[in-house]
Image (cartoon, rainbow, N blue to C red):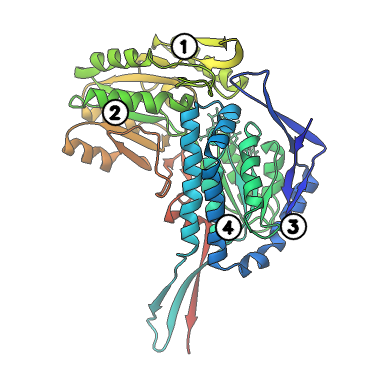
Amino acid sequence: MTVKPNFINGKWVEGRTHLENVNPSDTSDVVGYFSIANQADVSAAIEAATESKHKLSALTPQQRFDALDFIGSEIYQRLDELADLLAREEGKALLDAKAEVNRASQIFKFFAGEALRIQGEIVASTRPNMSVEITREPVGVVAVISPWNFPIAIPAWKIAPALAYGNAVLFKPSELAPASAWALTEIISRSGFPSGSFNLLMGYGRDLGPAMIHDSRVDAVTFTGSEGTGRLVATSCVSRKGHIARFQLEMGGKNPLVVLDDADLDVAVECAVNGAFFSTGQRCTASSRLIVTEKIHDEFVSRLIKRMSQLKVGDARAEGTSIGPVIDQNQLKKDLQFIQIGKDEGAHLACGGVHHSHISGRNGFYLEPTLFTNASNQMRICQEEIFGPIAAVIRVKDAEEALQVANDTPYGLSAGVCTTSLKQASKFKRELLVGMVMINAPTAGVDPHVPFGGRKSSSFGTREQGRYASDFYTVVKTTYVNP
Ligand code: TXE
């Protein structure tokens, strides 16, 4: 049995214990075994990352460009192989997995370019003879804590900017999807970044998270995951001894897709299917609330159900699968509990809701795409993040009520509106309390080079991705020069 090691200070380090990574499409298939880092490994990685700062500052922007470009190119060259691994360990359908791997490659390429575009400003002072220089410097050692649902793209959009702007990285991937993280690390290990500047620590967040965050040599923490864990991370960053760690949190969503009377229903149905069910609904940007005005409600629902009947649930890597399994038994249990809660709350289970413990002879965590109708926005299925292929239709009178319902949630990540009216599109764009607005497009599925993030309980801190990422991964310094 081969156990994949952690990567610390430029060396592969085996742990005393390990994780077993199981294919959610076929639980008899073990994807691999992965070392669990212990406290001593975390300390060694922090020490190495801290020591690597001077080596990192000696790298020219061109050298950082070359290393990041190398990573992006290799990910692209190995797209099919990495997508297969991703689909095997996470369960998203192969097409979605390919799109994710491609996006990871694009992100590394984008930030390779950003390494050459770090800029400052020179500003005239209010005082005679004085000038003011505003420059950006690396933050230092950054802990990257990532979830399982995008096991290569989310690490990419945290690691690439961290390295582009000259930081050292401690990478703690989700214990549920270490294989993609390990493959990414193996590529980074050959990219030319100095030893110690990139470290992989696999294992459980409840142990490794606090061990990283409580060490004041860790300057910043970037986290994506559940809201509850996000709050714990924030508390640890603030309450630890020494200076407060800079932190950035991307958490849950309860994203609305509004369909107005004047919508093109073909477009609206495709947006709903893609946003609610693709990637098995396990996306923070999933459209879990479909808010539909009453004139077109029945027509929209009947077309949506017809379209849902064409979605094939099955092995993530099998030909023709549109929806793979959910990630594991715990998530399946949570999804099934929410289906029961929806029924108990009085919503009508219009489609799906059925769990299959095996498909085509393979044991897996399969759940049919599920649609509730007659839902009200106050129900738990419309207020809490479920994170499965489950959506609820909320019938509203008009656009005014649709907007009010769309905003009536603790979250504020992404929101969509389907309309052919420019006036309505503009109004929703202005008044939706979210970080990302999608007009006639699914709430999920974003570009790799522009800001990503939300408001309210969805996000805290500066935006991820695109040029805006520099706000998190750099410190601004203001220098006054009196020549
Ligand atoms: O998340 P966790 P889980 C939501 C989704 C899902 C639920 C549970 O609703 O059903 O969260 O998923 C690390 N200090 N989302 O358990 O626990 C952990 O090891 C520091 C939504 O996977 O938040 C992993 O690397 N870190 C979300 C990461 O945090 C800790 C995506 C996320 O795990 C830690 C994923 C601690 N005390 C889940 N405890 C989205 N909206 O995108 C755990 N971790």
Residue at numbered disc 4: 67
Q: Which residue is mark 2?
A: 258
Q: CA distance from mark 3 to mark 4?
A: 23 Å
Q: Which tag is nearer the camera, tag 4 or tag 2?
A: 4
The amino acid type found where label 4 is placed reads Ala
Nearest the eye: 359 or 75 = 75
- Label 2 crowd (10 A; few <14 / some 14-19 / many >=20): many
Is the CB of mark 3 within 8 Å of ligand 1? no
Residue at the extreme front of the image, as rendered: 77
Task: Give how far apart the Cα atoms at labels 2 and 1 are.
Answer: 23 Å
- Give whichever of discs 1 and 4 has the lower sequence position: 4
* Left or right of residue 12, residue 176 in this image: left
Q: Is residue 215 above or below residue 274?
A: below
Read off the residue under disc 3.
47
Which comes sooner in the sequence, label 3 or label 4? 3
Q: CA distance from mark 1 to mark 4?
A: 47 Å
Numbered disc in front, either 2 or 3: 3
- Total count of labels: 4
Q: Earlier in the sequence, mark 3 or mark 1?
A: 3
Residue tagged 1: 353
Q: Residue at x 38, y 27 (%)?
A: 274
Relative depth, front residue between 368 and 472:
368
Q: Are marks 2 and 1 in contact (CB under 8 Å)?
A: no
Q: Are marks 1 and 4 in contact (CB under 8 Å)?
A: no
Labels 3, 4: front one = 4
Q: Is residue 226 visible?
A: no
> Which x, y percent locates residue 21?
68, 28
Picture quadrant where residue 4 is located: top right
Residue 178 in the image: x percent, y percent? 65, 36
Q: Quadrant of ligand 1?
A: top right
Q: Residue at x 34, y 35 (%)?
A: 415
